[in-house]
Image: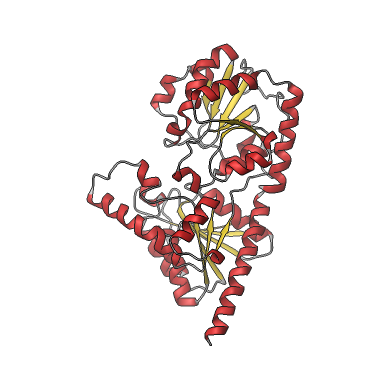
Amino acid sequence: MSHVGRKGTTGFGRTYSLARGLAGLGHTVSLLTTQETGFRLPWLVEDVDGVRVYATPELMTAGLSDGGYGVLSTALKTLFWGPRLYDIVHSDVSHRPASGWPCRFNRWLRGSAYISEWWDNYGREGQLAHRDRPRTVLGRFLQRYECWAEIESRRAADGVVVLSEAARKRAISVGIPGDKLVVIHGGCETEDIRFREPGNRSGGYLKDCTLIFGFIGLTTGDEQDLAPFLGAFTLLCGALNLGLVTCGGKQSVNMKTRLPADRIVDLGWLNFRRESHRLTDVDVFVLVKQPNAKNACGWPNKLGDYLAFGRPVLCTRYGDVAPLMDQHPDCFYPVDWSEASILQTLRAIATESPVRRLERSRYARRIAEELFSWNAKARELESFYRRILVSRKNNMSRDE
C-alpha cells in the first residue's frame, strides 16, 4: 500500500488502519510512506502491528511532501519497490506521484493488480472551487495536472475504492465501469478508544461546563463549514453553560478571538492510540458540514471515532451521512446548516434527560463496533481485492 504523504499526516490513519486490518486477516502487507522528520537513506523500516512500514526521506517542503509531490520520496519508492513482486498494489491518492507512480510502475513491470482510492472531489467543482487561484507558475501547473490526473489515474486502475455513493456516481460519469468500483466508508479505532459513560468526567478541562461539545481533527478548512455552529455556540455558551474542545492544533486567530477563551480548549495533535482518553469528557461531538459537491463526495473519517467514543453527533444531512442518520437516529442530533436550526437544537440537547443521553451513548458505541471498526472495513477491502483478482484472471483467459 502506497501512502501519499508523510507518516502520521494526510490520511495516514485510514491507510495504515486498513493495512493493519489486512495483516490481521493473514496477508503480508507493506506500507510505503515518507519520513515525518529526519533524513535516513534509503529508508526507515519498522514492523508495526504486522505491517512492514517503509518510510523514505524527502528534501521538499512539508506541504509538497504531504501533498504527494516529494521528488526524492517518489523516486525511491518507484525505483526500489517497483520491481518487487506483489499480488496487489494499492495507492491511497493515485493522482499524486508519491502514491500512484510506484504502484503503476509495479503493475507495468510485474503485472500486479492496481487498486486506487478516491477520497475526494479534487476537481474544479470540488476542492479547487474552494481555493484561491495559484499565484505561481508551478501552482498553476500543478492545478492543471491535478484536474487531468485525478480522472486518468482512476481510469487506469483495475479497481477503485470510493468513499461515498456520490463519488461512485461521479466515477461512472467519467467512464469508470461500475464493476470496478466499491464504496468503503471510513472506520474507527474501537480497540484504542475506550467507552466511558457520559457525565463520568476526568476533570481535565472545562470543569464547570454543563455540556461539552467536541470536534476532532480541526483544520483551517473546517471553519467555513462550522460557521453556523460557532455562531450559535457563541450566543448560547453563557446561558447554557456550554464548552467546546477541539484537537488538531489548527484553531485560527479568528476562532480564538471570536469565542470566549474560558469556553474553548484545543488539545493540539493527539495520538489516538495513546491519548484518546483525553476526549472522553465530551458529551456531544460536532459534524456540521455545508451540503455541497465537495463534501458529498468524501466521507468524514472522524464520524466513526465519534461513535466509538459512544457519543451522539450534532450533524447536518449531506452525502452518505444522510441515510446513516435515517437508519440510526439515536446516534444523531440532526440540524440544518443554519444558525437558527442549531440554536434550537442546542437548547433541546441542554434539556435532555441523563437517562436518554446514556441510551444514545450506548447505542452509538454498539453501532461503531458493528459497522465501523477498521477490521470490518479491512474485510470489505479484502472481498473487493478478491473480486478484482478473479475479474483480471477471467479477462486474461478470454484474451488468450
Instruction: Answer left or right for 228 relative to 372.
Output: left
The relative height of residue 47 versus residue 333 in the rendered view (above or below) is below
Asked if residue 376 can be seen in this view, the reply is yes
Residue drawn at 39 percent across, 46 percent down = 127
Q: How many marks?
A: 0
Q: Is residue 50 visible?
A: no
Q: Is residue 168 depicted above or below 192 in this figure?
A: below
Residue that protrudes farthest toward the bottom in the picture? 400
Q: Position of residue 136 (x, y in %)?
A: 23, 47
Up-down relation of residue 98 to residue 239 (above or below): below
Q: Nearer the viewer, residue 160 or 112?
A: 160
318 or 285: nearer the viewer: 318
Q: Nearer the viewer, residue 383 or 86?
A: 383
Which image quadrant for residue 28? bottom right
The single residue placed furthest to the top in the displayed view is 239
Residue 277, image quadrant: top right
Answer with the quarter of the image where residue 95 lies: bottom left
Say above or below: 160 vs 263. Answer: below
Q: Residue at x 36, y 55 (%)?
A: 69
Q: Residue at x 43, y 61 (%)?
A: 174
Give residue 75's position: percent from left, percent from top: 38, 64
Q: Position of residue 224 (x, y in %)?
A: 42, 32
72 on left or right of 189: left
